[in-house]
């Protein structure tokens, strides 16, 4: 399975619809002069989703090898209107979750 297919599989599982890859967008998010996230965000058109026409998706390794990967798929629903906004929402969500655990 290719990386794009793995992301499409994650979109299918998380959001219950099919998708079509549109483009890859390089994103670099900084905070106080430090890079907190850097990578490519994949843009997908959604097929049959009731609320969103697009989503932003990416994956990252959670272990020492590529066998342990986590995939994210953030719907393009306000306030998320761009790949950088999707990354920011994800970072904020992860930070809030780490504060409560």
Image (tube, rainbow, N blue to C red):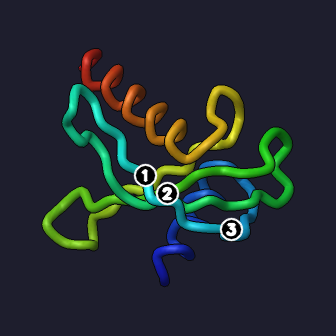
Q: Position of residue 71 (x, y in %)?
A: 44, 56
Q: Quadrant of the C terminus?
A: top left
Q: Which residue is mark 3?
A: 22
The residue positioned 45% from the left and 59% from the top of the image is: 26
**Tag 1, which secondary structure?**
strand
Is the Cβ of the residue at disc 2 closer than 8 Å to that at disc 1? yes
Query: Disc 2 and disc 1: Cα gap in Å?
Result: 7 Å
Query: Is residue 49 left or right of 57 when viewed as pictured?
Result: right
Nearer to us: label 2 or label 1: 1
Badge number at residue 27: 1
Is the Cβ of the residue at disc 2 closer than 8 Å to that at disc 3? no
Task: Farthest residue to the top: give it.
Answer: 100
Query: Disc 1 and disc 3: Cα gap in Å?
Result: 16 Å
| Label whose residue precedes the other's in the sequence (2 or 1) | 1
The residue positioned 27% from the left and 29% from the top of the image is: 31
**Tag 3, which secondary structure?**
strand
Nearer to us: label 1 or label 3: 1
Q: Quadrant of residue 74?
A: top right
Between 84 and 10, the one lying in front of the other is: 84
């Amino acid at each position: 399975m290719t990386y794009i297919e793995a992301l499409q599989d994650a979109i299918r599982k998380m959001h219950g619809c099919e998708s079509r890859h549109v483009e890859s967008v390089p994103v670099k998010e900084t905070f106080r002069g430090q890079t907190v996230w850097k990578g490519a965000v994949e843009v997908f058109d959604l097929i049959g989703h009731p609320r969103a026409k697009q989503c932003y998706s990416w994956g990252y390794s959670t272990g020492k090898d590529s066998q342990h990967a986590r995939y994210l798929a953030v719907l393009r629903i306000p306030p998320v209107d761009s790949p950088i906004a999707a990354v920011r929402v994800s970072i904020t969500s992860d930070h809030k979750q780490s504060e409560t655990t």
